[in-house]
């Protein structure tokens, strides 16, 4: 098998397990396979997908970002506080994004200039960002944000509804929720970036052999910094979307999300030693986690058992991946 | 477990320790070994020769339990056996010393020698005995290395000695050495040969792989030649010649070691370096590189040749000096600046610094010049990239199944060609080649020599850093001799000798920088 075939095989295996999960859950629960539930799953997956895309870029460079869950919370509450202070919603959300980007810049500088190990740099940021989020909100939820704040997280495109005979709206097609749309756009954009641009190629090169990349004229610092800024910005975006969906901003939101993101990337074939990974793989990984959660929920499996199962799935997929690479 | 450092005679001289019959090994898409026979007697040094990709490394790995053969048998002292792991092979007394040394940098020499076999007293490590035994091992090798020194503080040569000490401590009866002298100086090499002689007297069988055929005469008893994964012949070394071995290896006779020169050196200066200095490392020194010439950098290990090249390339900082390219002064602060100006550097450590091994041949070839295969909008054009890759694969005769092969799977010589191709695609005007033929087989060496001449003929300034004096004498037009960070002398190659170069390289006579 050449490498391209191997890659296809890996994708196929992941996709097949995704399909298998869907089939099993459809048989077990009659309400699993429906347009409504599909949308629910897609919506639930969006957060993991945004963060997974970010994690993939960072992990490809051989780094790791543990701070995305905390940045998400800080960005979300920042946006909410701004909106409550009277800033228009789009500007408030933009502020949230910028807060995320700023956190990413700090992460990136800690890694490239201070030469801290990424694990430590982003661990520090995780604590700092979470602490700031809790401090500026007094650890309380920020509510009363109005309908326009909720639009991004709850609105959808091409929603078709008729007013029924009883006077209530009768939903013909639920539409494509904005978060799902955003996920598709993001995934395509970042996939193109990774695969088709010089910058993307350089991300892989840095993760594959940083010294060789440097001696080939790759701006290793710049490329690494970019990865962390992208990660921070996407975490900020996730925060805005998530808080909008909940219509309140919780400073404790997004706890342990960084681990879901890393898990999605890893299930999708991204190598923690750097240089290897794809967005399509990560999306599949995110859906594997999302469908497992949703299906197990509908099957009435307890949250604790769900954790156990997802943990085992991660171990299994990475083991299979290792087997594939062993020669 | 016994941790006695000195191997006792393990077998009567001449007894067959290890015999491989019809061994086959296939990897995905490649037949690495195709029915190879090999036997090793007690008290002999048996060399395995072949070009890169001939299957030497795979054969060694099969013998030492890293790979399991797909066909054929291995007999250990007449018994068919199966080494499921390197550990199993070690238990049978078969130990391999890898070319890439496998030591733990943060542990001490003694701790490395007895790693996972530490002498214990109860539950605790017996530190006194650990040190004493390690000391005994090292003393036997006659090397002055402290058992307490952390391995990261040792030179590569010293680390090699630690690896050998480790093998001795296991009471190895079969010792497999992969390119043991590739990073040793001459005196260290003769030290190593003394140790090999002594091991042989003690009845140890030694499998010896080296590209340096000339040095084999001192130690080798028999030689087996492999080509393209096939067994060619086993001969007594006394009954053959280096030339015969080489012609068996490449399957044709090599009339000359070095290709004829097609270049015509001119007086036009391309690169001029003045007063370049870095505190405690080298300089101040200066040299000129002329159009159409190959300039050699000769000197002992640690003389500062690599450091000077890296400094010109912007890979390491400098404390002062100027670099002029075709009469224009350059401001080089990083490799990015140097590459923009057309200066390239091929690192001596290909795997660590030259090649992104997990990436494909095509991706490596375009790495330094990715924008050249990008179309409108800055997107990589894969057809353009593959076309570029195929062009260099053909031009440099890179042996690969295709442009999308992972670079790690190529042989050393072909990996080196990929790195060279990377700089050709970047249209470099000055290229520093740092030990470009290290660990590369004879046939591929010749191809690289031809390439150096061809590049110089095309007007590219070529600097060749080499520790092999025949290479310096056979390939360069002028040679700059370094000693402890100083440029001692620049000599006309055709008027000089190995002796004269060594004279300056060892620091005798002359001081400061001189340019002729």
Image (tube, coloured by chain):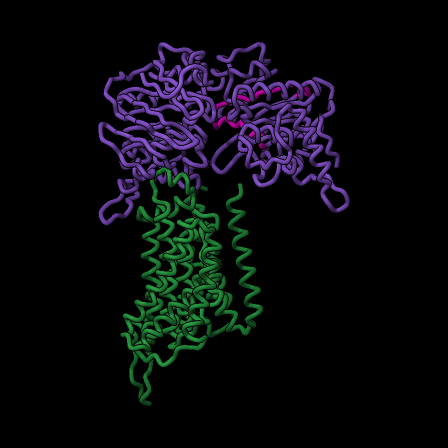
Chain colours: A green, B purple
Residue at the spot x=68%, y=28% of the render? B137
Q: Position of residue A289 (x, y in %)?
A: 48, 63
Residue B337 drawn at (x, y percent): 29, 38
Position of the N terminus of chain B, as image quadrant, is: top right
Please identify the quarter of the rendering in which residue B332 is found. Answer: top left
As for residue A229 lying within the magenta part, the answer is no
Q: Bounds of the magenta span?
A: B41-61
User: In this picture, is B80 found above or below A168?
Assistant: above
Residue under the image location 56 percent in, 22 percent down: B188
Q: Could you say which quadrant of the image residue B340 lies in? A: top left
The quarter in which the C terminus of chain B is drawn is: top left
In this orientation, does residue B514 appear? yes
Please tell me which residue lies in front, A283 or A2.
A283
Q: Residue A154 location in percent, x, y?
A: 35, 75
Q: Is residue B87 left or right of residue B158?
A: right
Q: Is residue B427 above or below residue A72?
A: above
Q: In percent of the image, x 58 and y 34: which residue is there?
A: B70
Question: Relative to B422, is B409 on the left or the right?
Answer: right
Q: Is residue A327 above or below residue A56?
A: above
Above or below, comparing residue A258 to residue B490 in the picture: below
Residue nearer the viewer, A202 or B496: B496
* Image position of B133 (left or right of B242): right
From the viewer's side, name the closer residue of A324 and B489: B489
Q: Residue at the far bottom: name it.
A: A166
Residue lying at the far right in this picture: please name it.
Answer: B122
Residue B411 place in picture, x, y as percent: 45, 31
């Amino acid at each position: 098998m050449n490498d391209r075939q191997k890659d296809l095989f890996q994708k196929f295996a992941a996709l097949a397990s995704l399909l298998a999960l869907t089939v099993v859950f459809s048989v077990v629960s009659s309400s699993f396979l429906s347009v409504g539930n599909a949308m629910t799953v897609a919506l639930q997956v969006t957060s993991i997908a945004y963060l997974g895309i970010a994690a993939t870029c960072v992990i490809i460079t051989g780094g790791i970002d543990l701070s995305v869950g905390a940045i998400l919370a800080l960005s979300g509450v920042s946006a909410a506080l701004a909106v409550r202070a009277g800033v228009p919603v789009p500007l408030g959300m933009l502020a949230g994004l910028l807060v995320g980007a700023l956190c990413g810049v700090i992460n990136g500088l800690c890694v490239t200039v201070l030469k801290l190990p990424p694990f430590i740099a982003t661990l520090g940021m995780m604590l700092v960002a979470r602490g700031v989020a809790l401090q500026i909100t007094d650890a309380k939820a920020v509510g009363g944000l109005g309908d326009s704040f909720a639009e991004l997280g709850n609105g959808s495109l091409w929603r078709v509804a008729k007013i029924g005979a009883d006077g209530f709206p009768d939903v013909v097609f639920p539409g494509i929720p904005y978060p799902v749309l955003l996920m598709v756009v993001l995934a395509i954009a970042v996939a193109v970036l990774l695969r088709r641009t010089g910058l993307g190629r350089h991300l892989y090169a840095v993760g594959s052999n940083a010294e060789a990349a440097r001696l080939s004229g790759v701006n290793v610092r710049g490329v690494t910094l970019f990865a962390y800024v992208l990660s921070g910005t996407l975490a900020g975006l996730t925060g805005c979307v998530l808080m909008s969906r909940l219509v309140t901003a919780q400073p404790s939101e997004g706890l342990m999300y960084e681990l879901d993101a890393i898990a999605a990337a890893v299930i999708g074939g991204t190598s923690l030693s750097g240089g290897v990974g794809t967005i399509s793989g990560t999306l599949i990984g995110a859906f594997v986690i999302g469908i497992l959660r949703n299906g197990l929920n509908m099957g009435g499996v307890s949250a604790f058992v769900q954790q156990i199962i997802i943990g085992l799935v991660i171990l299994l997929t990475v083991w299979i991946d290792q087997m594939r690479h062993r020669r | 477990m016994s941790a006695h450092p000195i191997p006792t005679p393990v077998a009567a001289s001449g007894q067959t320790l290890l015999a491989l019959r019809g061994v086959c090994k296939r990897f995905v898409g490649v037949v690495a070994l195709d029915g190879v026979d090999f036997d090793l007697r007690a008290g002999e040094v048996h060399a395995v020769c072949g070009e890169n990709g001939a299957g030497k490394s795979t054969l060694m790995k099969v013998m030492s339990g890293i790979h399991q053969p797909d066909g054929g048998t291995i007999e250990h002292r007449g018994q068919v056996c199966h080494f499921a792991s390197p550990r199993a092979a070690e238990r049978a007394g078969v130990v391999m010393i890898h070319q890439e040394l496998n030591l733990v940098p943060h542990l001490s020499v003694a701790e490395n020698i007895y790693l996972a076999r530490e002498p214990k007293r109860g539950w605790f490590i017996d530190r006194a005995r650990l040190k004493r035994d390690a000391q005994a091992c090292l003393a036997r090798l006659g090397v002055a290395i402290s058992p307490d020194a952390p391995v990261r503080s040792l030179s590569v040569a010293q680390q090699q000695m630690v690896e050998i000490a480790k093998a001795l401590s296991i009471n190895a009866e079969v010792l497999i050495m992969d390119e043991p002298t590739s990073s040793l100086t001459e005196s260290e090499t003769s030290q190593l040969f003394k140790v090999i002689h002594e091991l042989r007297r003690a009845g140890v069988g030694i499998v010896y792989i080296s590209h340096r055929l000339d040095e084999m005469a001192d130690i080798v008893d028999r030689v087996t030649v492999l080509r393209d994964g096939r067994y060619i012949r086993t001969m007594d070394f006394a009954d053959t010649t280096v030339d015969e071995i080489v012609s068996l290896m490449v399957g044709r006779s090599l009339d000359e070691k070095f290709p004829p020169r097609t270049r015509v050196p001119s007086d036009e200066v391309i690169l001029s370096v003045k007063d370049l200095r870095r505190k405690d490392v080298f300089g101040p020194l200066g040299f000129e590189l002329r159009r159409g010439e190959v300039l050699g950098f000769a000197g002992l290990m640690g003389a500062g040749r690599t450091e000077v090249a890296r400094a010109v390339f912007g890979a390491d900082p400098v404390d002062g000096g100027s670099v002029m390219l075709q009469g224009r002064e350059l401001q080089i602060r990083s490799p990015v600046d140097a590459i923009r100006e057309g200066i390239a550097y091929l690192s001596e450590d290909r795997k660590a610094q030259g090649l992104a091994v997990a990436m494909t041949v095509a991706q490596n070839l375009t790495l330094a010049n990715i924008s050249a295969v990008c179309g409108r909008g800055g997107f990589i054009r894969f057809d353009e990239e593959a076309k570029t890759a195929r062009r260099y694969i053909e031009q440099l005769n890179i042996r690969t199944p295709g442009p999308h092969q992972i670079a790690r799977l190529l042989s050393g010589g072909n990996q080196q060609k990929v790195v060279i191709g990377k700089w050709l695609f970047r249209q470099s005007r000055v290229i520093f080649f740092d030990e470009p033929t290290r660990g590369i087989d004879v046939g591929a060496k010749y191809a690289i020599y031809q390439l150096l001449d061809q590049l110089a003929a095309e007007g590219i300034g070529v600097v060749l850093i080499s520790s092999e004096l025949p290479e310096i004498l056979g390939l360069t037009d002028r040679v700059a001799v370094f000693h402890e960070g100083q440029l001692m002398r620049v000599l006309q190659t055709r008027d000089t000798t190995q002796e004269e170069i060594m004279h300056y390289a060892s620091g005798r006579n002359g001081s400061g920088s001189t340019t002729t």
